[in-house]
Amino acid sequence: MVINNLVDYKSILEKSNENIKLKKESITTFLSVCRHEERAKKLTRLIEATKLLKEESYKFRVLFVGEGENTEEYKHLVEDNDLQDYIIFCGMQKNPYPYFKISDCIILTSEYEGYPVIYTEAKVLGIPIITTNVSDSMIDIQGRYGIVVNKDVDSIKNAMKSFIENGYKIEEKFDAKKFNKNIMEKIEKLL
């Protein structure tokens, strides 16, 4: 039996309203929130996809919220490929939710994950997701809250391109109260 964590949706919604320096832009904004650790998170895939879309003259930006052992490597890759206008490093944020609010799409490029908490956070805030095929993404995300792609640069690039051109309409509204109720029922069955 799988039991997800309860979601403090009221706190997420409240925290998303805090002010930050960055503002909502008229171009598509993708958001990556994760530890900068290449072995699992594979942010080089996102940097490479961004480079390819820039070469095709697409206008968009990607916000990188987080830090880690590979942050400097990622910054060098961005500089070496002249992507500073496309990828913005926002650093580690105690409250990442205002960045969700100014973004159009959450993007996850991981090689592997447990159950990504960012899935639930994005659903609470009503933001579509592009994710590699990790964890329960095919069951939980595909066709409902976003798009699941293969773990390669071209698949990520094509999903981003499609999102820039067409957006993505979330098929069902996430009911956080029902989500929490189902978790509590599972816990009670175990007791």
Image (spheres, rainbow, N blue to C red):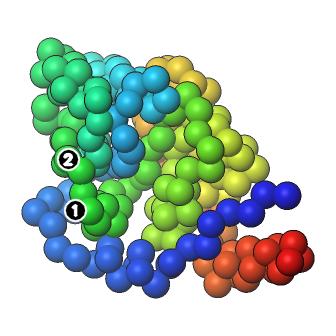
The numbered disc on residue 91 is: 2
Q: Nearer the viewer, residue 9 or 51?
A: 9
Q: Is residue 189 left or right of residue 99?
A: right
In which quadrant is the C terminus drawn?
Answer: bottom right
Q: Is residue 91 above or below residue 15?
A: above
Residue 47 x %, y %: 32, 26
- Quadrant hosting residue 88: top left
Could you tell me how far apart the alpha carbons at marks 2 and 1 are, in whole angstroms? 18 Å
**Residue at the spot x=22%, y=76% of the render?**
18
Image quadrant for the N terminus? Answer: bottom right
Disc 2 residue type (three-letter) = Gly
Q: Pinpoint residue 145: horizontal percent, then vertical percent.
A: 61, 57
Please, what is the three-letter code of the amino acid marked with disc 1?
Lys
Q: Tag on residue 24?
A: 1
User: Which badge, 2 or 1, comes first in the chain's sequence?
Assistant: 1
> For numbered disc 1, what is the local secondary structure?
loop
Local crowd at mark 1 within 10 Å, few (<14), some, or many (≥20)? few
Mark 2, Cα crowd under 10 Å, few <14 / some 14-19 / many 20+, is some
For this rendering, which residue is in front, 155 or 114? 114
Of the two numbered discs 2 and 1 in the rendering, the one whose residue sits closer to the viewer: 2
Please, which residue is most extreme toward the top here?
Answer: 80
Q: Which of the 4 image quadrants contains residue 26?
A: bottom left
Q: Is residue 101 left or right of residue 88?
A: right
- Count of residue discs: 2
